[in-house]
Amino acid sequence: MDAVVVTVLSLLAILFAVAAWASRDNFYSAIYMSAVMLTVGAVYAFHGIYSVFVLIAFIFIGAIGIITVALAATYRFLNPRKLNELWVIVVEIIAVVLAVTAGINTFMAGEFSDAFDRILPDYLTMIAFLIVLTTLLMLSAISMLRRDSA
Amino acid sequence: MIETAASLGLLALGYLMMISAKDVIRILIALELMFSAVFLSLVPFFTNPSLVVEGNAIAILTVFASAGELLILISAIIFLDRKFRTTAIETTDVGGDVL
């Protein structure tokens, strides 16, 4: 049963990624990309690794994902270039061979477990780290913006 | 494991999306696809009892580093649009400093 759920989630992730690549509109590509992130987070949640699921859900789907969707909704009209079909087929064959090889040669060494409490005492510390990181990045962005407009 | 195979598939699709992009927004989306492949490839760490702590630490560092990188890229895209009134990749240069 576990393998079926993980296989379905992985296939959904691949399908959403194909849709993000095939879509001509940046807005829909960003939506499909958020769906890929959601399925990746769902894999972690299904295995009971909730700390990584929380990180992916809050930071990538919640913050970065929303900004990307908003940005893509603003600039959505440049069509991507058409790739040579032969080149795409070669890349896909190599990717499938690599994926099958990696999938066969990696294995479960035991049951899934989470060790977040052995790295950080609680989620508040992590939230504090995230706020500091975002503030530092935004401060540098604001200083660049002010220098640019001066 | 199925997750590792799926992560390689996601990485290949991210690369394909990157090389077919004509604007930087699409490159940003492709990068996020590649980061999702990275997160999926970390799953096997959590099955080995002697590597679970390392897996958690790598996951936290990866999430923070990639979030910072994506925030900087989003700021750079906004600056690019303010300066050139376009997000086409033809306006960018190698290294980004000679324009």
Image (spheres, coloured by chain):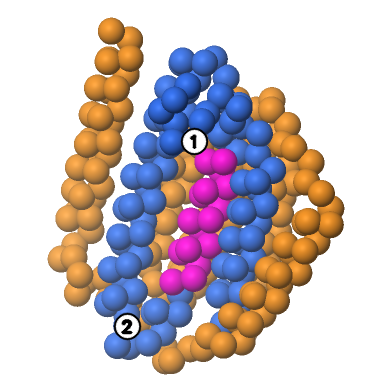
Q: Which residue corresponds to the image point at 59% horizontal and 61% vertical from the top-left?
A: B11
The kind of secondary structure element at disc 2 is: loop
Q: Which residue is mark 2?
A: B51
Mark 1 or mark 2, which is nearer the start of the sequence?
2
Please state which of residues B15 and A35 is positioned toward the viewer in this rendering. B15
Q: Which residues are magenta?
A: B27-42
Name which residue type carries label 2: Leu
Quadrant position of the N terminus of chain A in the picture: bottom right
Q: Residue A114 location, x and y as percent?
A: 32, 76
- The alpha-carbon separation of the residues under discs 2 and 1 comes to 39 Å
Mark 1 neighbour class, 10 Å CA radius: few under 14, some 14 to 19, many 20 or more: few
Q: Is residue A3 among the parts visible in the rendering?
A: no
Q: Colour of chain A?
A: orange
Q: Which residue corresponds to the image point at 71% horizontal and 59% vertical from the top-left?
A: A15
Q: Residue furthest top?
A: A150
Question: Quick check: B78 left or right of A22?
Answer: left
